[in-house]
Image (tube, helix red, strand yellow):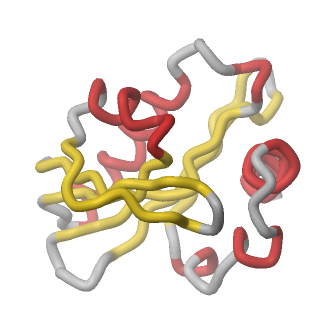
């Protein structure tokens, strides 16, 4: 429930994404992580298999505004990457909001392809070799 609440607050309430599209058919099968600070939920993300058996996808990485700048996004990515490795992943892909591209590049991801819109927001595909 904490992951749901964080995603709703960040993606739906703050950024204006469609609430019905935010919670999709991938959620029940994805591995989710929630980070807590002093017992309070602070950030979340998910990872799930892609079409290729050695490729996994990270998504829905979100941190409550009051916990940003504490490097929690990096911690969330690291935890999801570790879990993907355990599952057999050799590569990780993600759909990054363009405004977050620099963050993902600092975490070792490389952009590829053209910028595209997810709803109204520019995104770019990014990958990392594990």
Q: Is 42 positioned to the left or the right of 127 in the image?
A: right
**In the rendered image, which quarter is residue 101 located in?**
top left
- Please give left or right for residue 52 compared with residue 116 in the image: left
Rendering coords of residue 105 (x, y %) = 27, 32
Please indicate whether residue 34 sits to the left or right of residue 114 in the image.
right
Judge by depth and name the residue closer to the eye, 111 or 3: 111
Residue sitting nearer the eye, 10 or 41 = 10
Q: Is residue 21 left or right of residue 127?
A: right
In depth, the one of 91 and 38 nearer the eye is 91
Q: Is residue 49 above or below residue 56?
A: below
Q: x%, y% of residue 31?
A: 50, 64
Residue 82 versus residue 54 in the image, above or below = above
Based on the displayed image, in which of its 4 quarters is residue 116 positioned?
Answer: bottom left
Residue sitting at 24 percent across and 41 percent down? 109
For the point 43% across and 50% down, the residue is 96
Q: Residue at x 64, y 61 (%)?
A: 120
């Amino acid at each position: 429930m904490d992951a749901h609440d964080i995603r709703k607050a960040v993606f739906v309430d703050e950024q204006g994404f469609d609430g019905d599209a935010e919670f999709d058919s991938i959620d029940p099968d994805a591995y989710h992580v929630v980070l807590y600070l002093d017992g309070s939920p602070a950030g979340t993300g998910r990872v799930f298999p892609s079409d290729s058996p050695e490729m996994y996808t990270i998504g829905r990485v979100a941190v409550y505004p009051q916990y940003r700048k504490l490097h929690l996004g990096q911690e969330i990515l690291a935890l999801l990457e570790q879990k993907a490795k355990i599952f057999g992943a050799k590569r990780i892909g993600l759909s990054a909001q363009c405004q977050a591209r620099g963050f993902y590049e600092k975490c070792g991801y490389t952009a590829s392809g053209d910028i595209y819109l997810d709803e109204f927001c520019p995104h770019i595909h990014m990958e990392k070799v594990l």
